[in-house]
Image: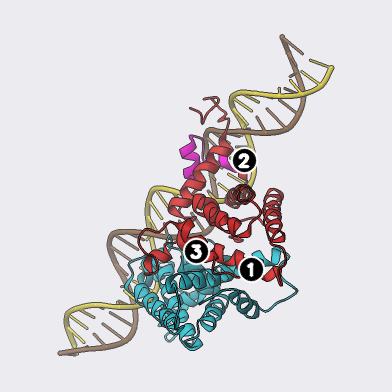
Chain colours: A cyan, B red, C yellow, D brown
Amino acid sequence: MATRETDGYHHGDLRATVLRRAAEQVASEGVDGISLRVLARLAGVSHAAPAHHFGDRRGLFTALAAEGYTLLGDELGAAGPDLRDAAVAYVRFALAHPGHFAVMFRSDLVRADDPDLLAARGRAGAVLSGGVGALGDVEDPATVQLAAWSIVHGFASLWREGAFERSDLLDGAADPEVLARRVVDRLTFT
Amino acid sequence: MATRETDGYHHGDLRATVLRRAAEQVASEGVDGISLRVLARLAGVSHAAPAHHFGDRRGLFTALAAEGYTLLGDELGAAGPDLRDAAVAYVRFALAHPGHFAVMFRSDLVRADDPDLLAARGRAGAVLSGGVGALGDVEDPATVQLAAWSIVHGFASLWREGAFERSDLLDGAADPEVLARRVVDRLTFT
DNA sequence: GGCCTAACTTGTCAGCGTCAAGATTGTCCC
DNA sequence: GGGACAATCTTGACGCTGACAAGTTAGGCC
């Protein structure tokens, strides 16, 4: 099927296949519960095949992170120039792509100097900065941006790890995006 | 010398020794760069000795997380009832004990039903809730608490991973606690 | 048709977590 | 003081993993 273009020696789409599976596995079992050999097995190739595309384990996570920043850039771009909309979009991205999100900020798992990673991250940052610029008159835009980034990043992380559920701060099965907007609304931007 | 009470068969303080080293290693090299066997070697015991105290790898991280929640509870308690002070204390804890912090919210690394963990976490949560109660008249205290938790957690995580340094949001070598307070001050609590 | 390169395989290695079984030591009770 | 007992640590083994090296196959390009 779609996973193989040729069913012989060459897989045909191994890089994308492994990357997709890796995102799923990281999302469901965490970063530690992942193995290049298992990913290779799932893709129907030999244990060393993924190494050709990613180098090593770190390379796989780096590629995953780069893809994540690309997706985040897209999401932020689609949200438009309003910073509050962008904030909610950040949360939406994190919860829609947990496998990517779990890796993107882990400097111990990612090769910091990877060109693809840097490019994708730079783009996402530029999109966000544009949103802050659109705010108009702000006394201390850098602090505002730090605060906004912190609050959405923290919210997404804590939600993802189930920290909120364990506390009694959630009223029933609240929608994370609704809640995220409510939380972001406690920020003053002026 | 203080690490061994007897230099014979029994180490005497293995559990605490391993835990301390583990915190250091996690802080410096990340969770993945840690190995029970290396920790055992560093403590001068056989490779299977730590298992007696922690069961398995997951047990080690669980113990580390529990210790982290205890430390966090102490820090929050020392900060007093003011929620802004507590928020800064949260950041201070995270940056002072990065090895613990890195593990505390990783549900994939921690045994969720561990009694020690639950007790320590419960205590830290109670201390924090007390601080929110001391705020007085608040329209929606749950949302306020979510927002405060999110912003400090996100700030600490992003700072820790070096995300802020990579952006151009920091003016020079800013003190994280000062910056944290400035960021928290963008929150409206009423 | 022949070459070149990318993609993948096979084989191997040391290190890891985990388990089982045995050795050593401190403690407590008589 | 001595013996049972539990806690602590060792030794040895197993399968799995990431990484590396060397060989094999296929596709593209002149």
The local crowd at label 3, few if under 14, some if 14 to 19, many if 20 or more residues have their Cα within 10 Å, is some
Nearer the observer, A172 or A110: A172
Left or right: C23 as drawn, with respect to A73: right
| Chain letter belonging to callout 2 | B
What residue did someone put label 1 on? B189
Lower position in the chain sequence, tag 3 or tag 1: 3
What residue did someone put label 3 on? B182
Q: CA distance from mark 3 to mark 1?
A: 14 Å
Percent position (x, y) of residue C21?
Answer: 64, 37
What residue did someone put label 2 on? B52
Residue A57 makes an appearance in the image: no
The residue at 53%/72% (across/down) is A99
Give the vertical position of B153 relative to B74 (above or below). Answer: below
Look at the image and give the residue range highlighted in magenta.
B36-53
Check if mark 2's residue and mark 3's residue have beta carbons within 8 Å: no
Have a look at marks 1 and 2 and say if they share a chain: yes
Amino acid under disc 1: Phe
The residue at 49%/36% (across/down) is B43
Lower position in the chain sequence, tag 1 or tag 2: 2
Question: Circle 1 — which element?
Answer: loop
Q: CA distance from mark 2 to mark 3?
A: 46 Å
